[in-house]
Image (cartoon, grey):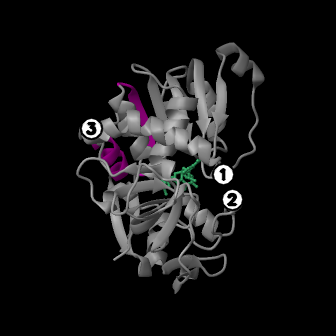
């Protein structure tokens, strides 16, 4: 099969389209013929050699989410049959003609979406559902602040939070990104390049913060949270070592949490899939959630897709199309 491989750690040009053996699959897995694969920031970290694949997962083929057709089913698979249109969260190996995945981690492509739109759903929806709604316990009427509002993660968090009736504030790096967030339903944006979010928002005004920045945002986040607020980390792009005033945690009863999705056991991901199909798929099918595809690239131009992601010019998802 064809696969985009990381030929050695380094710049986007290390991504090469090469031939690899078709992967095998287990009894409880399906083999997906990939039509489109989402590009995510963690793929860039993996390409740079900073985000190793979990045991048993292809270290050289990146790709955490795909959409395609079920090509083969393991002997124990009952839900799917050959030819079904699915999208799936995978732990790696998505930038290829075929990828194996636990049957329970596949979801039917919702509504009228094509492969390109569907490929951009799993990674951000699984991450946002777990972190904002399960860990952060965001509820109707509460206020969510999302740092990196125009990221793939951000556009998903905005739309799901609005769908349950929350107020959504975002930080972004440009007016254009801010306007795009407003168009997706965000209530307010702060361009962090011109305005300090700590000055723009009143203290004690936010219930849940989803942060991928870390570093010196930490102290500001703590001040912005209301009593019983929840601070959820999914990355620490500006640094993971911070200092904490424990009195503020005690006085406001703040919960600080976070998670990384990729290395979680398949049982967790299967349970998350079931919850997402129950609660999020109806939102997509109702038309209240849009798959925002910023740009597509063929597998042969995977390097250009990574260059775009690293430029941070994109708003929404970057998708590799296997044509
Ligand atoms: N924990 C998990 O399970 C998990 C799963 C998936 C993704 N993630 C993380 O979630 C984040 C978003 O992922 P994604 O795939 O949606 O990425 P993405 O679309 O590339 O978004 C990242 C955004 O963050 C902003 N940004 C980039 N570098 C930054 C920096 N050094 N400091 C501050 N902001 C920066 C940029 O927007 P502006 O121009 O507006 O700054 C950029 O658009 C990534 O950090 C990723 O590693 C975590």
Q: Which residue is mark 1?
A: 263
Report the Cα–Cα distance between label 3 and label 1.
30 Å
Label 2 or label 3, whichever comes before in sequence order: 2
Q: Decide if ligand 1 comes within 8 Å of the CB at mark 3.
A: no
**For mark 1, does the 10 Å Cα neighbourhood hold few (<14), some (14 to 19), or many (20 or more) residues?**
some
Is residue 185 visible to the viewer in this orientation of the structure? no
Tell me which segment is drawn in magenta: 165-183
Circle 2 is placed at which residue position? 54
Residue position for label 3 = 288
Q: Secondary structure at mark 3?
A: loop
The residue closer to the viewer here, 45 or 52, is 52
Residue at the extreme front of the image, as rendered: 75
Question: Furthest-bottom residue in view?
Answer: 19
The residue that appears at 36% across and 34% down in the rendered structure is 188
The quarter of the picture where the C terminus appears is: bottom left
Q: Secondary structure at mark 1?
A: loop
Q: Position of residue 221 (x, y in %)?
A: 59, 32
**Where 11 sits versus 255, above or below?**
below
Q: In the shown orientation, is residue 12 left or right of residue 257? A: left
x and y, in percent, of residue 111 in the image: 25, 47
Q: CA distance from mark 1 to mark 2?
A: 6 Å
Q: CA gap, disc 2 to disc 3? A: 35 Å
Name the element at disc 2: loop
Queried whether the magenta region covers residue 179, the answer comes back as: yes
Question: Where 138 falls versus 18 (above or below)?
Answer: above
Q: In the rendered structure, does residue 234 fall within the stretch colored magenta?
A: no
Mark identifier at residue 31 = none
Is label 2 or label 3 in front? 2
- Residue 289, given in percent of the width and then of the height, sits at 30, 42
Q: What residue lies at 49% left-to-right and 77% top-to-bottom?
A: 303
């Amino acid at each position: 099969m064809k696969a985009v491989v990381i030929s050695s750690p380094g710049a986007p040009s290390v991504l090469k389209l090469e031939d690899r053996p078709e992967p095998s699959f287990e009894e409880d897995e399906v083999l997906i013929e990939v039509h489109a694969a989402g590009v995510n920031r963690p793929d860039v970290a993996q390409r740079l050699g900073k985000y190793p694949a979990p045991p048993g997962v292809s270290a050289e083929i990146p790709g955490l989410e795909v959409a395609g057709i079920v090509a083969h089913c393991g002997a124990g698979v009952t839900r799917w049959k050959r030819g079904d249109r699915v999208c799936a969260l995978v732990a790696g190996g998505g930038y290829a003609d075929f990828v194996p995945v636990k049957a329970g981690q596949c979801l039917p492509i919702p509504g009228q979406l094509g492969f390109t739109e569907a490929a951009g759903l799993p990674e951000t929806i699984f991450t946002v559902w777990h972190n904002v709604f399960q860990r952060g316990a965001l509820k109707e009427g509460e206020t969510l602040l999302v740092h990196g509002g125009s990221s793939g993660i951000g556009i998903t968090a905005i739309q799901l939070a609005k769908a349950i009736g929350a107020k959504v504030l975002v930080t972004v790096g440009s007016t254009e990104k801010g306007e795009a967030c407003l168009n997706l339903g965000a209530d307010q944006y702060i361009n962090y390049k011109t305005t300090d979010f700590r000055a723009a928002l009143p203290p004690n005004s936010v219930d849940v913060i989803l942060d991928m920045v870390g570093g010196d945002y930490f102290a500001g986040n703590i001040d912005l949270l209301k009593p019983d607020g929840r601070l959820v980390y999914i990355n620490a792009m500006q640094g993971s070592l911070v200092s904490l005033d424990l009195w503020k945690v005690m006085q406001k009863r703040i919960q600080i949490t976070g998670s990384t999705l990729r290395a979680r056991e398949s049982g967790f991901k299967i349970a998350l899939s079931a919850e997402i199909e129950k609660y999020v798929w109806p939102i997509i099918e109702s038309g209240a959630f849009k798959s925002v595809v910023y740009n597509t690239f063929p597998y042969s131009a995977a390097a250009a897709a990574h260059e775009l992601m690293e430029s941070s010019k994109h708003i929404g998802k970057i998708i590799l199309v296997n044509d």
